[in-house]
Image (cartoon, grey):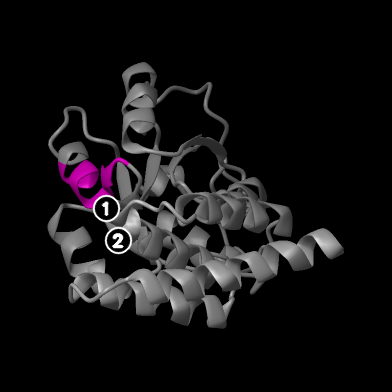
C-alpha cells in the first residue's frame, strides 16, 4: 500500500520530474490511450500500472494502493463511473481519483461519483497532465522552487492504435453482438479522439447516436467497419 504520509524511502519530486515517487494505476482498455499515459508518467517521473477492465483494477487494488488512479468511463465490463463511486467509499481512500473519457458529456456524472478531476481525451499535454495532478497533491509532495512548464505533447506508437482498431474489427464482424454496440461506439470515440482521427470520431458518434435513439445500427456499424478496415489495410501496406 502507498500513502502520502509515506516514509523517507519515497524519492522526492524534482522540477524536471515533478511526479517522482507517485504510482499511477491506469484503468483503460485502449492500448493507444494507455501508451500516451505511459509516456506522460515516464516524462513526469511517476510509475505506472495498467488494468484493462474493472475486474483487473480490483485485483490490483487488493495488492497495493496507488497514489493516483485514472479511470476510463467506458470499460468492457461496466461503467468507470461506478468504479469511481466505489473507490470514493473505500477506506483508506485513494488520494487522487480522475475520470477519463472522449465524451465530455459524462463530466458531471464523473464528478458526482466523487472523482477529484476529469481528463478529456486526448490526454497528451505533459504540462496539463502534471498540473492537474500537482494541484491535488499536498505541499510536501510537490517539487520545491520554480518549475518550467513545457508545452510538449506525447505521441504514442501508431502500432498501439492499430491494435485498438483490430480489437474493434473483431467486435463488429458479420455476427456482431448488438449488446456491445454501445461499448464499441464509446471505445472507438475515445480511441479516435486520442489519435485525432476526425473521420472515425464522426462515424463512432453516429453509431452512438443510432444506438442511444434505438435506431437500426446495421448501417452505421457497416460504415464503421469499412473505415476501420481501410486503416488496417493501409497499415499493412506500409
- Indicate the secondary structure of the residue bearing disc 1: helix
Query: Which label is found at residue 219?
Result: none
Which residue is painted at 16% across and 45% down in the image? 85
Q: Position of residue 87 (x, y in %)?
A: 21, 38
Q: Position of residue 75 (x, y in %)?
A: 34, 48
Count of number-bearing discs? 2
| Above/below status of 36 relative to 238 | above
Label 1 crowd (10 A; few <14 / some 14-19 / many >=20): few
Residue identified by numbered label 1: 179
Range of residues picked out in magenta: 77-85
Q: Is residue 165 left or right of residue 217?
A: right
Q: Position of residue 70 (x, y in %)?
A: 39, 48
Q: Is residue 156 left or right of residue 190?
A: right
Say which of marks 1 and 2 sits in front.
1
* Extreme-front residue of the structure: 174
**Residue 78 among magenta residues:** yes
Which residue is painted at 56% across and 58% down in the image? 145
Q: Is residue 31 left or right of residue 3?
A: right
Disc 1 and disc 2 in contact, CB within 8 angstroms: yes
- Indicate the secondary structure of the residue bearing disc 2: helix
**Residue 208 among magenta residues:** no
Q: Which quadrant is the N terminus positioned in?
A: top left
Distance from the alpha carbon under mark 1 to that under mark 2:
7 Å
Decide whether the magenta segment is chiefly helix, strand or loop. helix
The reply to whether residue 73 is in sight is: no
Residue identified by numbered label 2: 182
| Above/below status of 77 relative to 111 | above
Q: Position of residue 118 (x, y in %)?
A: 33, 62
Q: Nearer the viewer, residue 201 or 67?
A: 201
| Above/below status of 169 relative to 4 | below
Which residue is painted at 65% across and 46% down in the image? 42
Amino acid at each position: 500500500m502507498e500513502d502520502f504520509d509515506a516514509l523517507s524511502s519515497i524519492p522526492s519530486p524534482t522540477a524536471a520530474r515533478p511526479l517522482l515517487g507517485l504510482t499511477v494505476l491506469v484503468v483503460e482498455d485502449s492500448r493507444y490511450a494507455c501508451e500516451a499515459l505511459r509516456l506522460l508518467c515516464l516524462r513526469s517521473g511517476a510509475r505506472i500500472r495498467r488494468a484493462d477492465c474493472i475486474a483487473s483494477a480490483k485485483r490490483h487494488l487488493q495488492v497495493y494502493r496507488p497514489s493516483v488512479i485514472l479511470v476510463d468511463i467506458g470499460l468492457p465490463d461496466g461503467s468507470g463511473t461506478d468504479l469511481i463511486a466505489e473507490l470514493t467509499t473505500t477506506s483508506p481512500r485513494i488520494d487522487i481519483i480522475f475520470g477519463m473519457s472522449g465524451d465530455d458529456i459524462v463530466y458531471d456524472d464523473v464528478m458526482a461519483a466523487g472523482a477529484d478531476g476529469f481528463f478529456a481525451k486526448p490526454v497528451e499535454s505533459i504540462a496539463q497532465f502534471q498540473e492537474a495532478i500537482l494541484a491535488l497533491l499536498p505541499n510536501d509532495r510537490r517539487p520545491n522552487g520554480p518549475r518550467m512548464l513545457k508545452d510538449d505533447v506525447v505521441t504514442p506508437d501508431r502500432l498501439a492504435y492499430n491494435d485498438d482498431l483490430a480489437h474493434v474489427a473483431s467486435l463488429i464482424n458479420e455476427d456482431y453482438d448488438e449488446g456491445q454496440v454501445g461499448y464499441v461506439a464509446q471505445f472507438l470515440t475515445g480511441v479516435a479522439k486520442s489519435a485525432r482521427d476526425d473521420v472515425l470520431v464522426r462515424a463512432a458518434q453516429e453509431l452512438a447516436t443510432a444506438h442511444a435513439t434505438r435506431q437500426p445500427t446495421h448501417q452505421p456499424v457497416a460504415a464503421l467497419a469499412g473505415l476501420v478496415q481501410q486503416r488496417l489495410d493501409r497499415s499493412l501496406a506500409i
